[in-house]
Amino acid sequence: MYRTHNNGSLRAADVNKEVTLAGWVQKSRDKGFIIWVDLRDRYGMTQLVFDEERTDASIMEQARKLGREFVIQVTGTVIERDSKNPNIATGDIEILVSKLEVLNASLTPPFTIEDETDGGEDVRMKYRYLDIRRKPVRDSLIFRHKVALEVRKYLSDQDFIEVETPYLIKSTPEGARDFVVPSRMNEGQFYALPQSPQTFKQLLMVGGMDKYFQIVKCFRDEDLRADRQPEFTQIDCEMAFVEQEDILNIFEGLTRHLLKEVNGVEIEKFPRMLYDDAMRLYGNDKPDIRFGMEFGELNEVAQHKDFGVFNNAELVVGIAVPGGNSYTRKEIDKLIDWVKRPQVGALGMVYSRCNDDGSFKSSVDKFYDQEDLAKWAEVTGAQKGDLICILSGETSKVRAQMSALRMELATRLGLRDPKVFAPLWVIDFPLLELDEETGHYHAMHHPFTSPKPGQIELLDTKPGEVKANAYDLVLNGNEIGGGSIRIHDKETQAIMLRHLGFSEEEAKTQFGFLMDAFEYGAPPHGGLAFGLDRLVAILGGQETIRDFIAFPKNNSGRDVMIDAPAFLDDEQMKELNLKLRDQKSKH
């Protein structure tokens, strides 16, 4: 037995017990006649004491040679500390060591294993196994475990069955590129890693499983951001004999359960918002409703004068920044520079100050009088002391620009409190999106999403107006889950695929197995998938997902710790019947 207790368990009630502990040396302090060593494991920290009056000289000598991150085992007696430490759970006691064994020495770590480390992100990712020893990362991984455990509890109580689906599947068009895997036994053929278990969970409904879930890895070969990874985890769910309302109720319940059990927060309201309203009021389909600053469309009250910038715009839109009239001209100029950055892309910004005396002062006073500016305030809901920020241009672009500005201002104003949770359902998405470059439509969600009842006929005449029987669950400005009622008959699925540009032969090649299954009594069904990584990060009060993933990739999709991806050797390439297009050196 390496230990009788862990390093977070001993208390004052344990004084005089003989114990054996093991763990890592956090740090040591040598005062000559006495040495203190902090011993750490996953559970906490315990102070060890080596006292030349009470400790053998040989053990004192061993203790002096201990370095950071040495793995050691000690036996000793629990004694009361003279100088107690209220900041740690074991702060009332220490261990007077009578036996010390070094289980493994350690090189000096490339960064300090502390809550606030001196290591940059790149070096910490290279030595991720050391980074995991730090309390913030360790606690994030434990937090993820707790969330996953509560998910399984809730869904199991709702009669869901966890079923595993394959990782080696057939490549199907689902929006992003597939990761592909060559088959040695089937020369020239490839598996794909699943972007989601979409078709399999539908087949499970055909198979009569009724309620399925899986906490499952998914894979997408796409450009990455701080909140994306090439491999990610979904809470994947599907239900048979359900309508949209049934699904929304079940997963409102799951979200309430997680917020209560994990965060101790009670949430009652899950408002619902049409996709069109989300775009009109917030400029995106995942609005953060913890704060206001809703968009006010100003075309009717701003395009009647000689200001060409507004007159030539498809959309003129403004937001009221609470207390923003206190901004200096220099601060406003910096805000204008911010929206003109390439990442946002605005050409400029018009503003209007709402003064305390009820008057207005605008950057375009030359074109607009006080009566005009008062109408701007009315449309945007601006009050005395606020600042109205206005952008104009092409509708889709200006909405995205204003959405980015709204979120930036909310961050600056401290309105995005991570301890406040505001869930929201966004419903009635468009079924199809128009690709402006090709002029073709593609599925906004995926090809298996059902149109709203009674709208399938519109596919032939007004495809852009067809609404999907789809829904997203948004939490604090992040999409944490999305799903739809699925198509469950072969005829409707064939119509959908035809409108997405698949020939009858292509549809049969890609999805014949699913369409054939629909001919054997497929029940009405639908589901939803949560993004577990993002959900855990939001519940944990963080913006990015990396610290909630044990071994994440960087923004280039590389694991710098194990140096992957990597070239295969010539023998493996030959065995897999692969050859690089250019024969450049692999070394």
Image (cartoon, grey):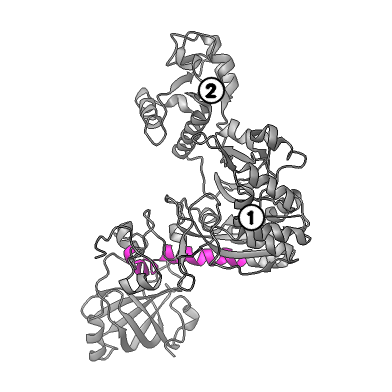
Residue that numbered label 1 is attached to: 508
Locate residue 386 relative to residue 487 in the image: left or right. left
Residue 144 falls within the magenta-colored stretch: yes
Type of amino acid under label 1: Lys
Q: CA distance from mark 2 to mark 1?
A: 44 Å
Please tell me the numbered disc located at residue 171: none
Say which residue appears at 25% left-offset and 60% top-offset.
584
Closer to the eye: label 2 or 1 = 1
Q: Is residue 100 left or right of residue 86?
A: left
Q: Is residue 575 above or below residue 553?
A: below
Q: Quadrant of residue 131 in the image?
A: bottom left
Q: Is the residue under label 1 in contact with that under label 2 (CB below 8 Å)?
A: no
Instruction: Judge from the rendering whether residue 60 lies leftward or rightward of residue 170; answer left or right.
Output: left
Question: What residue span does the magenta drawing correspond to?
Answer: 126-150
Q: Report x, y in % for residue 518.
A: 73, 58
Q: Residue at x 45, y 57 (%)?
A: 230
The tag on residue 315 is 2
Q: Is residue 50 magenta?
A: no
User: How would you classify the magenta stretch by its main secondary structure?
Assistant: helix
**Mark 2 residue type:** Leu
Give 11 or 169, whichever is nearer the viewer.
169
Q: Residue at x 48, y 77 (%)?
A: 9
Mark 1, other Cα within 10 Å: few <14 / some 14–19 / many ≥20: some
Q: What secondary structure is found at the residue carrying circle 1?
A: helix
Q: Quadrant of the C terminus?
A: bottom left
Mark 2 falls on what kind of element? Answer: strand
The answer to whether residue 269 of the structure is visible from this angle is no
